[in-house]
Image (cartoon, rainbow, N blue to C red):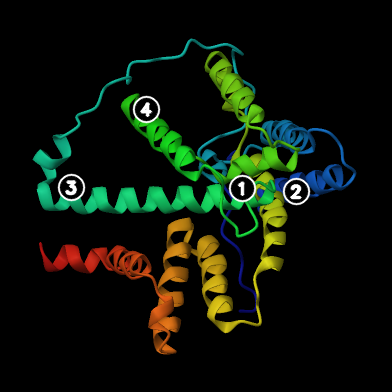
Amino acid sequence: MAGARGPPVLRGAPAPLPGGRAALFCAGLLLMIVLYVRRTPAAILISIAVTAILAVLVNSVVPIPPEEWGVVVPHMPESLVSAPSFGLVWQFDLFGGFVRAGALTATVVLFTLVLSGFFDAMGTIIGVSDEAGLVDQVGRVPRLGRILTVDGVAGMIGGSVSASANTVFVESAAGVGEGARTGLASVVTGALLGLTLLFTPIAAVVPAAAAAPALVLVGALMMTQSKNVPWTDIELAIPAFLTIALMPFTYSITNGVGAGVISYTLIKAARGRFAEIPWLLWAVSLVFLAYFGIDGLRALFG
């Protein structure tokens, strides 16, 4: 509309930086790409640190409203060392949810969490292992049962100490990108994470805009594995595409895996190849159908 003016700017108020986070993210990503292709050791870590420092400088020069940054607002901490608090350790009620929410509601929530956690872990384990070259000739991860056992036990320990889900994350591929293969990187990472309990003010300086470029680079590295998908085979191409596309669009590995499993089973059945559909695949497909229709089931059964 001709002659229209923008919203008034209050004098004395901090001027927001339009696209500030996006600009920092792009700068960090470009720096990370340059360092990585030049085979600079610790390219990902260096880029995150440089971008975090740049974010602190930008936020100090051009104050940005805290809500624009998200959870972490980059700023110079008053102290580099802080005593950790363990007040929430063991503060949980194992069966309290069943009492307060009712058995049916608690069971539905538990079913959703278990299904999501299991297939999130499976997708991440297979993807990271494939990128590390640790899968066998048929695409299976050796000793997968042990890996899932460790993941499950770690998840229980994380919940018992009131921490976030202590499970496998795709960020582990950042270590693979730096050459990690034997598991020693995970041990060192865990030890350093324990050490950061004393330096939480420093860890709280890194905003999402500084850490997110690592996920983009890792995603690009993992995407190279899609060359192994036989895209000329429609029975595999459609499930693979749905799996790859839905994961980022729905922010869930489980949703992508579920769409791939259901579509693969449906295509096989539509072609009359029932003998090629194992009973376990039928069962998993039904479970995923229940997962996607959980809201309808909850409304149906109250």
Disc 4 versus disc 3: nearer the observer:
4
Q: Which residue is mark 1?
A: 128
Q: CA distance from mark 1 to mark 4?
A: 23 Å
- Name the amino acid type tagged 4: Ile
**How would you rate the neighbour count of disc 2 (Cα within 10 Å): few for under 14, some for 14-19, many for 20 or more?**
many
- Compared to residue 202, the image places residue 215 above or below, namely below
**Mark 3 or 1 closer to N-term?**
3
Q: Secondary structure at mark 3?
A: helix
**Mark 2 or 3 closer to N-term?**
2
Q: Which residue is mark 3?
A: 106
Q: Residue at x 9, y 39 (%)?
A: 99
Name the image quarter holding residue 298: bottom left
Camera-nearest residue between 142 and 206: 142
Q: Which residue is mark 4?
A: 157
Name the image quarter holding residue 93: top left
Q: Which residue is mark 2?
A: 29
